[in-house]
Image: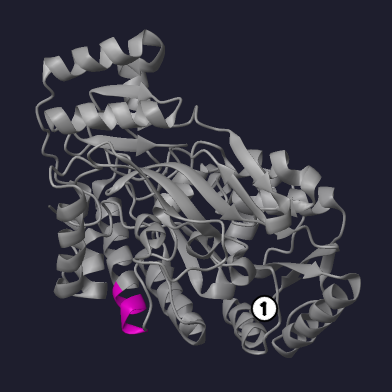
Amino acid sequence: MNAPNAIAHLLPEVRQRPIPAAFLDALAARFGPEQLSTALAVREQHGRDESAFDVPPPAAVVFAQSTQDVADTVRLASEYEVPVIPYGAGSSLEGHLLAVQGGISLDVSRMNQVLSIAADDLTVTVQPGISRKTLNEAIKHTGLFFPIDPGADASIGGMCSTRASGTNAVRYGTMRENVLALQVVTASGEVIRTGTRAKKSSAGYDLTRLYVGSEGTLGVITEVTLRLYPLPEAISAAICSFPSVEAAVRTVIQTIQLGVPIARVELIDAQSVACLNRYSKLTLREEPLLLMEFHGTPASVEEQAQTVQDIAREFGGQDFEWAVTPEERTRLWSARHNALFAALQSRPGARPINTDTCVPISRLADCILETIAEVEASGIPYFLVGHVGDGNFHVGFLIDPNAPQERVTAEDLNHKLVARTLRMGGTCSGEHGVGLHKMGFLLDETGAGAVEVMRSIKRALDPKNIMNPGKIFSL
């Protein structure tokens, strides 16, 4: 494979570009102390994400409050050829936010407003800094909701940039399917719009899809128009425990192949269930389980649930345990989203290395079972969860930061997992993005020709290479 070996993963390439004093002076004159900070604590906060990489922080942080602020910042950065790294909530996992070539962090978290709601058209337009939970709270009076749920309370702009998905993707799709239009500040500081509120278009290149998933390397998103969905008339969540991970996964595969429109189906392995019980004070059976959610009319929810219950019994699944009230469902899904923190509590002081792969649903059981066998043989503590309804799963390795060999072993396991996924027709990243960690894997997945096309697009749209440089591929 072309992916870096385990040792190379430990040391991302850092090539700091000089930051002209005149550039910082120009930023200070434009923004003043309320919107510009060079304080070390602020820079360090914006120079870390949830990855396992350590890189020097950016030289400064600009807090944008409008599209004009973003445009002015990027124009100055272009003039002085200084890297710009967009920042939303800081929840990314693959090193997207790290200043590997120096530069400044452009924080858009203050741009957090709902700009317009078109309830009749099932759309909403927002600024990029609004979080998904805040958005849903703001629109709940309309009877609509935005379904994409990556777990973390990520910003909408960041979710666009990484093409996020999460627990609801099996029914509602990913950000790719749910972003209709964007406003973007290009690498020269020009403000452009892509797409419209119409459900479809054949007008020219699909620039919206180009920017969704570009990880901040082509421009800065400053407005997003999203699809909304009616709140389901009935929602029920159910837990089903299984004698093995294979039995749980086979149940999911048959459910999807039968066309059951399940809204969420999450796999949690037995070790993770035990961690969740301790962390969230639950009393779940400490066996592999599926956490499911059904949306629709009361009759359709009942029919879906009965179909899946019948399938589960064929594979040794227990009778469903139901969570019908909003409070019960919230408790269960909050526990699922806290799986990382629950696992970390099981090994105090550990640092996680999170994986993210996705395979065709027919290969899911094989991929997960081979991965588990390999990880258990290594002796590295781990946890496994997955959005298995669409073939996406994560293994988290809990390593001792003071034991370098554990990091090497974990990276080697990740390398083997991605190689296995690609052999099975899958992808190196189902939802976390490429960032720093999977640059070599992208080459393995797409081939040199496709990566060179991506580089050509990057050079054309960002000729000075200032937009989050050093991510996705080397340039």
Looking at the image, can residue 149 be seen? no
Mark 1, residue position: 243
Identify the colour scheme used: one colour
SS type, badge 1:
loop
Q: Is residue 2 left or right of residue 419?
A: left
Q: Amino acid at mark 1?
A: Pro
Residue 150 placed where, x, y %? 55, 54
Res 423 quadrant in image: bottom left
Q: Residue furthest front?
A: 203
Q: Residue at x 28, y 54 (%)?
A: 437
Q: Is residue 73 above or below residue 474?
A: above
Task: Identify which residue is drawn at 82% across, 64% down.
Answer: 236
**Residue 61 x %, y %:** 32, 23
User: Residue 327: within the magenta?
Assistant: no
Q: Residue drawn at (45%, 25%), measured in percent from left and top?
A: 65
Q: Return the x and y of residue 216 as percentages of the image width and height.
A: 32, 46
| Magenta run includes residue 420 | yes
Up the image or down, 457 lies above or below 470; here it is below
Q: Nearer the viewer, residue 379 or 271?
A: 271
Magenta stretch secondary structure, dominant: helix
Q: In the visual, does 286 lie left or right of 12?
A: right
Magenta residues, start to end: 419-424
Q: Residue furthest right?
A: 299
Left/right of residue 140 with respect to residue 444 in the rendered view: right
